[in-house]
Amino acid sequence: MKVQAYLSFQGNCQEALNFYSELFDAKIINRHTYEDRAIDVPSSYRGKLQHAELKGKHVHFMAYDVSPDTPLNSGSQIHMSIDATSEKEGKILFESLSAGGKLHHDFREREWGYYGRCTDQYGIGWMVNYSG
């Protein structure tokens, strides 16, 4: 069995994946737009992502732009969690993810190690951990 995250965006999925691709040194694969799909979306939305994946050495998740008639509410039901390989890596990742977003808990030492939580500029929640 394999469980995998599938992130939803409202028209800015490509922009978000470009950001994550650079941050995590990962590639965008299986990229499909609404262009050739038999899905009723406005012509202005045809170039948006109907499906894509971000895959790298230590990251793999899927993402898409919901169709314009699909309600999408930013919420706290899911957070992506990162286990960094060093305190420095965790700090760099956290600073990049929280820039332009919302800071919930600073990345700092806790009882169990280093931890920070934020919502990035695309509305995705992230928890960054390093336990040494």
Image: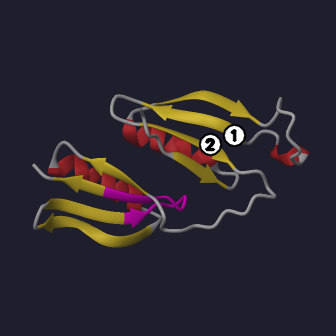
Q: Residue at x 27, y 69 (%)?
A: 106
Answer with the quarter of the image where residue 119 lies.
Answer: bottom left
Instruction: Tell me which numbered mark, 1 or 2, is placed earlier along the sequence.
Output: 2
Residue 74 magenta: no
Mark drawn on residue 125: none
Q: Amino acid at mark 2?
A: Gln
Pointer 1 with pointer 2, Cβ within 8 A: yes
Q: Magenta stretch?
A: 118-127
- Can you tell which of label 1 and label 2 is closer to the viewer? 1
Residue 122 magenta: yes
In screen coordinates, is 49 left or right of 99? right
Which percent across, then down, holds residue 131?
Answer: 13, 52
Which percent across, then down, holds residue 82?
Answer: 31, 49
In screen coordinates, is 41 left or right of 1? right
Q: Residues within 10 Å of mark 2 (few under 14, many from 20)?
A: some
In screen coordinates, is 13 left or right of 116? right
Q: Residue furthest bottom?
A: 104
Q: Secondary structure at mark 2?
A: helix
Which percent across, then down, holds residue 123?
Answer: 53, 62
Question: In terms of depth relative to the viewer, which is nearer, 96 or 114?
Answer: 114
Which percent across, then down, holds residue 22?
Answer: 44, 38
Q: Quadrant of the N terminus?
A: top left
Q: Amino acid at mark 1?
A: Leu
Q: Secondary structure at mark 1?
A: strand
Residue at which label 1 appears: 49
Mark drawn on residue 14: 2
> Looking at the image, is 73 positioned above or below residue 80?
below
Rounded to the nearest angstrom, the CA distance separating label 1 from label 2 is 7 Å
